[in-house]
Image (cartoon, grey):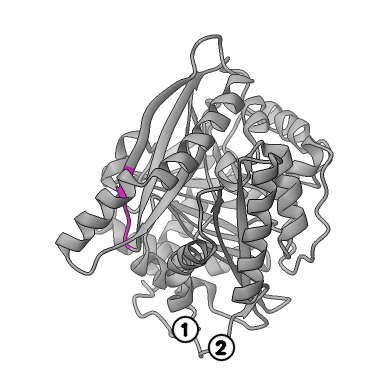
Amino acid sequence: MRKTIPINVKSVLAFKRKLLSWAKNNDVFILLDSNDYNDFSEIHHYDFIAAFGVADSLITSYKNAFAQLELFYKERKDWLFGHFTYDLKNGLEQLTSEHVDNLHFPDMYFFQPECVILSKNGQIEVQAMQNIANHAIEEVLDEIKAAPENLISQQHDSFIMNKKFSKQEYLNAVNQLKEHIKRGDIYEVNFCQEFYSNSSIDPYSTYNQLKELSPGPFSCFYKLDDKFLISSSPERFLKKEGNRVISQPIKGTAPRGKDKDEDEFLKQQLADDIKERSENVMIVDLVRNDLSRSAMENTVRVDELFGIYSFEQVHQMISTISAKINEKDIVKCIKHAFPMGSMTGAPKISAMKLIEKYERTKRGLYSGSVGYFTPEGDFDLNVIIRSILFNATQKYVSYTVGGAITHLCNAESEYQECMVKAQAMKKVLNS
């Protein structure tokens, strides 16, 4: 059990900014923010949620990771926050990750926080462990309220983001993957490319800038010692509430228009695009199959197919799939759906083998997931895309973008779609 203390603030936005500024005092800190997206308000537990203070933690490699997480949660039945990297796939199937990793996030990390701050409908509260004295909590809250809002975003010195692929190498790889599709090896594969620099950034002001430029309903600032995730993700991987789970894969992207008329035209063009719809429906079928492995019989449903949602930088095609599960199968349904279909392809295992063959970076946290578990056994997990990753010790800055390769796709168009997805990160990094 935890004790709950209400927090009185004049401005929720100002409090969030102060909270992020104060986060510099913590070795481990996470802020998950919906950015008040109305389209997602009915299926968000909270407007924002933050956690800090490590009472206990689980850090593990991919080997038997999900079983360890299940035991860790059952022994505590409390709030847990943390991440899954894409490379947990190696513990689920006969797969490997041989590419270089300069970010060094552990394969899985979850921590039981001393304090959780929750915001919903303008009301903020802190839930703290019983052994923490009330005066200690008040001192922390006073520190947060006294922290600067950090309203002025610092521009980074301009630096060049290096490419793992030249444009021509990327185009060649896409065409080679299309040959695999023609041979029947796969139907679809998510192919990604990394941009990186051996540089340093201020992760706090970088997050503020990214949030201002491209706020996402599944945004995250996550600090794990010297490693940082700065995310404006628009995508949910999996959410559990009671015995219902939902997944909301994104497949289908269009740029925003220069004016209202062009914007509406691009939205409708995306909605009608045969290629984008075929990509989306293939992943919907894959997710339906993944959820069916944990679901009660005849409960898997497609609640929305080909929904068009608008964000600051792009329009996206999003579908929603739901199922009912045994409420005690908290980790089982995550394991059976991981990695998320939108970031792999179909068939999933064959697609992941080709991802390893053709990509040039170990994905690590990119295309993995960050989120939380509640004491009641619910959870909400995002998909780590549209994100900047930073290792302060290694002085390594990275972002990765990708897209779905199908038999209908055009290599040049896929490259341009990657550039659209990268534009917010590129602008924030002044690169």
Q: Residue at x 68, y 32 (%)?
A: 335
Q: Residue at x 65, y 66 (%)?
A: 172
Earlier in the chain: of badge 1 and badge 2, it is 2
- Horizontally, is 397 left or right of 91 in the view? left
Which residues are the magenta region?
308-312
> Mark 2 — residue?
159
Q: Does residue 421 show up magenta in the picture?
A: no
Q: For marks 1 and 2, give the CA distance.
A: 7 Å
Classed neighbour count for the residue bearing mark 2: other residues with Cα under 10 Å, few (<14), some (14–19), many (≥20) = few
Q: Amino acid at mark 2?
A: Phe
> Mark 1 — residue?
430
Position of residue 60 measured from the top left corner of the image (x, y, whole percent): 79, 46
**In the figure, residue 290 lies in which quadrant?**
top right
Is residue 36 placed above or below 281 in the rendered structure? below
Position of residue 238 measured from the top left corner of the image (x, y, whole percent): 52, 35
Q: Amino acid at mark 1?
A: Asn
**In the figure, residue 262 lies in which quadrant?**
bottom left
Q: Nearer the viewer, residue 312 or 239?
A: 312
- Horizontally, is 397 left or right of 185 in the view? left
Quick one: which residue is furthest to the left in this view? 261
